Structures are given as C-alpha cells and as structure tokens.
Amino acid sequence: MKRIAKFEKVSFEQYKKDWLDMEPGDGEERIREVYDAIRLPKRATAGSAGYDFFAPYDFTLKAGESTKILTGIRSRIDEGWVLKIYPRSGLGFKYRLQLNNTVGIIDSDYYGADNEGHIQIKLTNDGREGKTMGIAAGTGFAQGIFVEYGITEDDEATEIRSGGFGSTTK
C-alpha cells in the first residue's frame, strides 16, 4: 500500500468559528468539549478501503431531515490523489442515508484552503419507511476512500485554491 495522506484535526480556532456559524448561541465550553473528543478517521480492518469518520457529537435525523456535521478533520493528501467521502454502507442500507452532494470530493489542495481544509459533511436521512436515525458521538457515520487520479495531456490548470465549496469555479 502507498502511504499518501495524513489526517489531522483543524485548529480549535477554526472549529469554533465554523461551529458558531452553525450554532451561534453555544458557548466555548461546549465547543471545546466536542473538539477535544474528536477522533481521527481510521480503518476498521487491514482489508478495509474506507477510513471511518466518527461523529464528533450526537445527532438525530428523522426521515427527510438533513444536518451538517463539522468533523474537525482535515487531510494532507499527496498530489495526484483525492479523498472521496461516502456514508457508511450500513447506514445507507438501513436509513438510505445520503450525502447531499452524493459523493464528497476532498482535493489535495483543499488542505491549504482558508478554512484549513475543514471537512464538513452534510447528510440526509432519505428513508421512505419513516425511520429516525440516531448517531452517538464516537460512532462511525461516513467513510473516506483515497483514490489516485490522472489528468489530460493538455491540462493547463494553474489556479490556486482559496476556499471550499464553489471556490474553484469563481
């Protein structure tokens, strides 16, 4: 196996900024408690392709509801590789859990973005059976798979990333 990436936590300052954008009324003590408990993604077995992302806090999704998860994680990725994010297979099967952008794409240059490359995952319980999904803090809810990619012979991309969503098409 090639070793091409490393997971890290974003800084507390970045996590707090993103948290307060989502939950402006929360205090620093609550944010610090969640931040300190963040677990880096890891594979469950030697044969696993996916790195499990663990919920940094409890969340519940009724059928049809969505939520954004601030993972507190970023990934330094070698050039020529991408991290693809998917829901955990079992949650997709039981609840039809989906990422709102279908597959999260974390490019190698996202690490240096103005938000420190903070991976945020928006999920929807798209189940048709009316089941409510509850995820406890520390439970795997998504998985990331590193994939090598190529570019065309005539590729001339030279732009430098500055942000996250939509920043490469401005």
Image: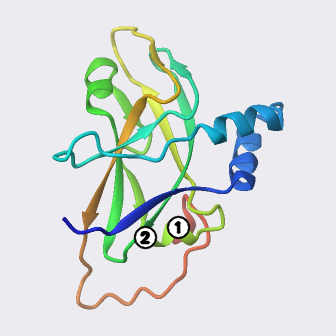
Residue 78 lies, with reference to residue 142, above or below; the image says: below
Which amino acid lies under the numbered mark 2 shown in the image of this protein? Ser
Viewer-proximal residue, 30 or 120?
30
Task: State the residue at coordinates (52%, 67%).
Answer: 111
Which amino acid lies under the numbered mark 1 shown in the image of this protein? Tyr
Which SS class for mark 2? Answer: helix
Q: Is residue 170 visible from the viewing direction of this image?
A: no
Residues tagged 2 and 1 counted as in contact (Cβ below 8 A): yes
Residue 41 lies, with reference to residue 152, above or below; the image says: above
Residue 89 rendering spot, x and y as whole percentages: 26, 32
Res 130 quadrant in image: top left
Q: Which residue is mark 2?
A: 108
Q: Residues within 10 Å of mark 1 (few under 14, many from 20)?
A: many
Q: Which residue is mark 1?
A: 111
Q: Looking at this rendering, what residue extends furthest in the top direction?
A: 130
Residue 19 rendering spot, x and y as whole percentages: 71, 41
Q: Is residue 84 left or right of residue 54?
A: left
Residue 54 rendering spot, x and y as whole percentages: 45, 36
Q: Quadrant of the C terminus?
A: bottom right
Task: State the residue at coordinates (68%, 49%).
Answer: 15
